Image: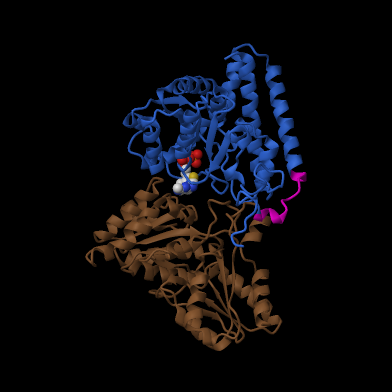
Amino acid sequence: MDTGELLALYEQMVLIRRTEKAAHDLFLQGLVKGTTHLAAGHEAIAVGASAALRDDDYVFATYRGHHHAMARGATPEECLAELMSRATGLCGAKGGSMHLTKAATNMLGSYAIVGAHLPMAVGAAWSAKLRGTGQLAVAFFGDGATNIGAFHEALNLAAVWKLPVLFVCENNLYMEYTPIADVTAVPRPAADRAPAYGIPGEVVDGNDVVSVQETVARLARRARAGDGPALLEAETYRHFGHSRTDPATYRPAEEVERWLKHDPLDIARGRLVEAGVPEERVAEADERARTVVQEAVEAAKNAPPPDPREAFTDVWADGGAAWRT
Amino acid sequence: MADVISYREAVAEGIAREMRRDPSVVCLGEDIGAAGGVFKTTAGLHKEFGSERVWDTPISEQAIVGAAMGAAMTGMRPVAEIMFSDFLACCWDYLANEIPKVRYMTGGQVTVPLVVRTANGGGLGFGAQHSQATENWALTVPGLKIAAPATPADVIGMMAAAIRSDDPVVFFEHKGLLATKGAPPPPDHVVELGRAAVVREGADVTLVALASMVPVALTASERLAEDGIGVEVVDLRSLVPLDTATVLASLGRTSRLVTVEENPYQGGWGATLVSVVADEGFGLLDAPVRRVAGECVPLPFADVLEEQVIPTVDKVVAAVRNLAAY
Ligand SMILES: Cc1ncc(C[n+]2csc(CCOP(=O)(O)OP(=O)(O)O)c2C)c(N)n1
């Protein structure tokens, strides 16, 4: 990867980190309702994988999906406005944090029923194959999702049909509050299961954007060539608790410390410096991201709330919600 | 024991009382152990009863409910937690096809005494996949009992009845009520399923509510009292068995009926109730029946939108006022 590209990926990760931090602060100020599942710490997976995809590839994410939406073209302003229940939000304030979706860029949604979107990605890949478009579908999900039936059904189906789909597990060691290791019979909840479905199962450092990009690019080439799906387990860590109400006190201090030292932004910054990119260039990227997010927060704060009548639009294809004549 | 208990604490207390009483009572579900459940409704159980009896499972709803079924068929009394009622859909085969049919299909040879507990309903801005009031899903399935308490004392009393029941019970705990408080009930408090409660007396209109709609109905009644309209509020407490006798008796006093439900109008339990009244209590009525219900849209995220969808005190007041004037 050339340094220009790496710098761009770095900036994107900073943008996501700052947006997540803003979401957290806005939450504490009472401006974000419901709940949020922040992805701070997971940035390299979304950004690295997206860098390896075509613009028209399909992406499916979970309730922890801010980073995927942004890596696939949603702006910080659209995302923050959605979280803050503004009319200008990505989903018109109907979806909220857990359902960020940007269909215009084939980011086909964030789903809050664990595992539900894996079969959807299989369907999207099947459709791409039928239409002969060469598109790929990618499902991002957590380690916890590997124990739900839909995961196993999706993997098998994708494998028997040799579909162009990548299953990318963000293994952050925990389902909500329970260590994944306590409730899973194999040490690698995703990769270890791949052989049972006859597909490659790989492990990557999910905090190193370059490794993620390279690995996804390789698996994507393979899938596009007709060799079928793959399962990638990206090891990472969430900086915050599971959701806004969780202080994550169940995590051992040494573990937290070890992982915070293995921060995806630091790793990318280290690579940039090593490649001879001057510190000012990196600082400029930091500054640009800071400004974009600051402006996004202001714009979202100033945006109007949705029209209450919007509660009754979009159920049906005619735009409305009428269930009787 | 403290002089007040929250609805949230009442869930754990209700389960604990039964676990102390009966060693065959066991719990299973996601994050219910040391973490105490995402809503802290199982707090303390793991500490008191250990991981043998309080089983932390992976995210595997089919396995949770399927395993609860197997345990129930073989001598245990499992209490399974499905974290949000929306996720009941993930294990719907067990709830709709397996559990409720076994006693019948086997001619009474095999029984499934289990409880599936779940956090139900909206009002917290959790978006479309974490906010539905789904009690009607279960209402369509012959063979399931349905509990939906509105107060901490009822949570404890109905939990006892549900766990002791030889039939499968789906137990809906309302997310919007978890922080509410009430007097703790005495030891061995049992509220039989199928017994509605008249929680406010009034002579003009009967208002029938369930779970989170009970406080809405009570607040509306206070407002209506200022207009001189006497509202009798009936908390149904369970949908199966459905206490139609209490509703009909109340109509004998008021002759006017309004139901208020959080779920959408079509297929809502209110429809079943008013059809029973039309069938068996038509002569008691002096006016048409009215149903206040949720709108038929997925629950939107923003507060201003959610308020449009879930029944509010204002909507209930308007419906009752309108009917009282009929
Ligand atoms: C079917 C279903 N069961 C349970 C939940 C509740 N829940 C939401 S997130 C979560 C943990 C998911 O952990 P993991 O898949 O590792 O993803 P992470 O949150 O770590 O990104 C659970 C149990 C859900 N949303 N859907």
Looking at the image, can residue A176 be seen? no
Snapshot quadrant of residue A65: top right
Looking at the image, can residue B275 be seen? yes
- Residue A72 percent coordinates (x, y): 60, 31
The colour applied to the residues of chain B in this rendering is: brown
Image vertical order of residue B304 relative to residue A49, above or below = below
* Residues drawn in magenta: A301-312
Residue at the limit of the structure toward the right, as seen here: A302
Taking the image as shown, residue A140 lies to the left or right of residue A200, namely: right
Residue at the limit of the structure toward the left, as seen here: B109
Viewer-proximal residue among B250 and A20? B250
- Residue A87 percent coordinates (x, y): 71, 47
Residue B324 lies within the magenta run? no
Q: How many numbered marks are there?
A: 0
Quadrant in the picture for the C terminus of chain A: bottom right
The colour applied to the residues of chain A in this rendering is: blue
**What is the basis of the colouring in this image?**
by chain
- Residue B198 percent coordinates (x, y): 52, 80
Instruction: Write the residue at 65% across / 74% down.
Output: B319
Viewer-proximal residue among B129 and A278? B129
